[in-house]
Image (tube, coloured by chain):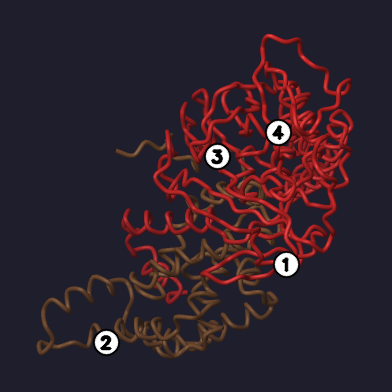
Amino acid sequence: MHDPSSNPSLRVAAEADDASVIANSCRDPEWFSVIFDRYFTAIHRYAAARLGPAAADDVAAETFLAGFDQRGRYDLTRPEAKAWLYGIATNLIGRHRRNELRLYRALSRSAARDDVESHADRVTDRVTAEQLSPRLALGLKSLSPGDRDALMLVACAGLSYAEVAFALGVPIGTVSSRLNRARAKLRTMLGHPAKEV
Amino acid sequence: MEELQELRRYHDAIPEPAPETIGVARSRLGTHMHGSRRRRARRIRPMWALTVAGAAATVAVAVTVVAVTAVPDSGKAPQAPQAQPPTVTELHLRPVANAQDVADNAALLAGDEPAWTAEPTQWGYVKSLTAQTRVDGGRWLRGRPKVTNTREQWRQLNDKAFALVEDGELKVYKGSEFEVTYPYLLALPTDPAQLLTRIYETIDAENAEHRASSLESARQRAENSGRSPEEAQRLAEESVPPLTSAGRDRQAFQTIAMGMMDTALPAALRAAMYGAMAEIPGVRYEAKATDLLKRQGITLYHVLDGYLRDEIFINPKTYEYLGYRTIVVKDHRDEPFDTMKKGEIHNWDALVKAAIVDKAGQRPG
């Protein structure tokens, strides 16, 4: 059904790094759709992990609109646009903080449900929350926004400390201390020993 | 590390967005890319620069030719425009057989116009029509468009401000966002050959500057990814090929066309611009054409690499500029985008009205 060779981004992938594509998009806007094709799914998944699927649709779409508007300021010495886009997405997620907290609250409740709640609700929640324990969800909710951003960028998006620093516009030392704080708090809530951190 | 792993598993297990979600987001981006209200000045023209460069054609209504009738008169010997200046009441234009004739006749008519007296603080008013040639990255227009958009625009002749009507209100913006500015145009020589020389000088200077900065950033990227300086230089050279001669000619054609589409100009300058176009290698003339407003016209056109034709429409009687179109004339693979198909129309603009006025927001009477 899907022929990979018909996908422009796959054809380009072998030749042009993100920086070249973004440089081209400053002359020919159409090029920016290559960036969309390369990263939309990843950005959407990250946003969904933090906001749930519905809000993720908006945030992921808006990430690329904002990226398009800011492409003229992209640092062309960075071949990969990944950290840049995650930074934009994280910024937008910050505007949906209440959604994020609501999601974690919902996830944290899912195991505590009893028979009073409808079966359908439980199935839905279980599917969403399959991989996240209620206590971890509760822990995420308790983190400060900056600490949570750093943690989610490392844990979910798989960015390096240096990439997180770039994405959030903070020094690398700040990233490291935010992460330590976040993990210490989670471990306390999860009942793990905190001394490793 | 358990909490990090658990978060990662949770994240990775989230399903991919539905195809409809991707489609909606993609189309929002498409609309955003094409619909940005303010057209930014850009240093380099892509082949479809004119879509982005905006607005449409113009002709100075304030200096419109009157009392001149073109008499198609193929029986008589062609008159040399320089040798025999036209009179106001009677003028015999020689039949047009090529692009050069178009320019000559335009020059002949222009010689008869009142002198250009516009002040730098006055405004060039343009009302134009743009065809919708594509919606959200879908199929390109073929044939005549169903949807057209009318736009009004004022540009101060000193390039210090421009104004648009947005949501029914006049908005005045400081500065310029135009690639080919009034001060540049009004300082062009009115001899076609000299004008063309100036256009090529501009293009070469811009391209040299752009190529130098592209090479430098390509070289830095290559070095950052661990290449030797020599290899980085070689890769950079390969990724930023120099402009071809045909590409350079195309830019000259587009620069001149952009100068006409968005401006109210003295007829003599416009005639020289036609003349310069006629001297660009590969520029041809076609006698029968119908523009966006279904007006009969003639065209000057340039075909890039055998597949993409840019053309301007000209009124065959007054030699006023009528509009602009980009049309695919042969199938062409255009990586990384879709294949261009013969018959697709990528841009189509028409000039409705143009004049010099005293204030932004003022319309010619």
Looking at the image, which residue sits at the far front? B89
Q: Is residue B59 above or below residue B237?
A: below
Query: In the image, is B274 to the left or to the right of B294?
Result: right
Nearest to the eye among marks 3 and 1: give it.
1
Q: Tell me if mark 2 has few (under 14), some (14-19) or many (20+) residues whose alpha carbon lies within 10 angstroms of its own.
A: some
Relative height, residue B259 to residue A176 (above, below): above
Label annotation for residue A12? 3
Which percent across, then down, holds residue B150? 52, 54
Q: Please give the residue where the numbered disc 4 appears in the rendered image.
A: B68
Q: Say the numbered circle drawn on residue B48.
A: none
Chain rendered brown: A
Q: Is residue A15 left or right of residue B64?
A: left
Q: CA distance from mark 2 to mark 1?
A: 65 Å
User: Badge 1 local density, few (<14 within 10 Å), some, or many (20+)?
Assistant: some
- Residue type of the residue flagged with mark 1: Lys
Chain that appears red:
B
Query: What residue is shown at x 10% (from left), y 87% (from top)?
Result: A115
